[in-house]
Amino acid sequence: MILVYKCGKCKKTFTLPFKVSDRGELNKRNSLLIEKCPHCNFKNNIIINDVKAEISPYTNFLYGYALLVSIIIGVLMYFFFDFTFKATSSNWKYYVFALIFFIPFIIAKTIIENDLKAVQTFNRYYV
């Protein structure tokens, strides 16, 4: 989760360097917030209720990377099982194959869901 704020002068959004879970914690840690806009170098007095949370772009990158890894593992495991276990009749190996295929995807999906819940909680709570 990243915190963003819209500049009062140029109206462009910029990220804030704080790692907090809600606006109350942001208010406790920093009662007077002044941040410089990287676009126009205007010093903004930050109003805590105007700060918004967004999902980090790194989280979306992680999700895409995990999906790609899952597909590559799935293709490799399919060929591995096809050549190695062709003569066997047990089905548990295919269940293991499916589990290995989905492990990176499930981990990335869990991280994204937690980040989305944190964003929704931050944006819903006002000081």
Image (cartoon, grey):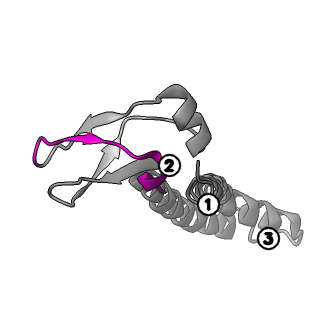
Q: Quadrant of residue 90?
A: bottom right
Crowd tier of the residue under label 1, counting other residues whose Cα lies within 10 Å: few below 14, some 14–19, many 20 or above: few
- The residue mark sitting in front, 1 or 3, is 1
Q: Nearer the viewer, mark 2 or mark 1?
A: 1
Left or right of 12, for residue 107: right
Task: Provide the residue span drawn in magenta.
Answer: 40-56
Q: Is residue 51 magenta?
A: yes
Q: Which residue is mark 1?
A: 124
* Residue to which mark 2 is pinned: 1
* Sequence-wise first label, 2 or 3: 2
What crowding class fits label 2: few (fewer than 14 Cα within 10 Å), some (14-19), or many (20 or more)?
many
Mark earlier in primary sequence (2, 1): 2
Three-letter code, disc 1 = Arg
- Residue 114 drawn above or below residue 46: below
Q: Which residue occupies 51% across, 59% down?
A: 63
Query: Quadrant of the rendered structure where residue 45 is?
Result: top left
Q: Nearer the viewer, mark 2 or mark 3?
A: 2
- Is 125 inside the magenta-drawn segment? no
Marks 1 and 2: in contact by CB < 8 Å? no
